[in-house]
Image: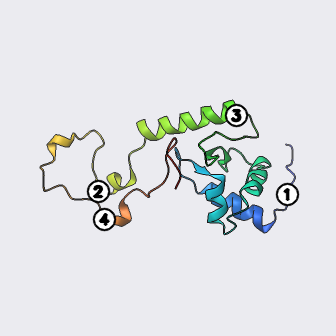
């Protein structure tokens, strides 16, 4: 079995990779968003360089990071693959995953809206609602 060389990461690289690892399936963030999130708002180009050298592209989803202007940006394994991965994740999220608050509340995803009486439908508690985030193709603020 081939042994992998372990690379030592700088604190900045660790912060970037940890932040990107937390981006949910089917959602994207901008390089600028990642830079702000790690406390270095002007380091968005450095974020791109770190992600370009990501040694674990299948485990740390750097393909979920795009440019602020909604352009796809670069990807170490090719832009075409990045587009395909984003579309696949978007499809998986839309068609296969039930939002976690529905699972917690025991609501079947096949339940039709008209079966729920108006006025009696309660929102799930704030702690169980989906976290606000950017879906593929939305604008950044």
Q: Secondary structure at mark 4?
A: loop
Identify residue for label 3.
Answer: 79
Calculate the distance from the C-alpha at mark 2 to the C-alpha at mark 4: 10 Å
Given residues 11 and 135, the one toward you in this image is: 135
Residue at 53% across, 47% down: 25
Identify residue for label 4.
Answer: 125
Question: Which numbered disc, 2 or 4, marks the residue closer to the eye?
Answer: 4
Residue 34 pos. (x, y %): 64, 58
Proximity of marks 2 and 3: CB atoms separated by less than 8 Å: no
Residue 45 pos. (x, y %): 75, 54
Calculate the distance from the C-alpha at mark 4 to the C-alpha at mark 3: 39 Å
Identify residue for label 2.
Answer: 105
Disc nearer the start of the sequence (2/1): 1
Residue at 35% across, 56% down: 101
Disc nearer the start of the sequence (2/4): 2
Quadrant in which the N terminus is drawn: top right
């Amino acid at each position: 079995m081939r042994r992998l060389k372990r690379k030592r990461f700088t604190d900045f690289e660790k912060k970037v990779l940890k932040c990107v690892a937390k981006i949910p399936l089917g959602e994207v963030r901008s390089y600028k968003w990642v830079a702000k999130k790690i406390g270095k708002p002007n380091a968005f180009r450095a974020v791109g360089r770190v992600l370009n050298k990501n040694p674990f592209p299948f485990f740390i989803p750097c393909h979920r990071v795009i440019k602020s202007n909604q352009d796809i940006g670069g990807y170490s394994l090719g832009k075409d693959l990045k587009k395909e991965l984003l579309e696949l994740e978007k499809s998986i999220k839309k068609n296969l995953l039930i939002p976690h608050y529905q699972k917690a509340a025991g609501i079947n995803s096949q339940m039709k809206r008209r079966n729920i009486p108006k006025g009696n439908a309660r929102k799930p508690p704030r702690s169980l609602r989906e976290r606000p985030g950017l879906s593929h193709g939305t604008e950044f603020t």
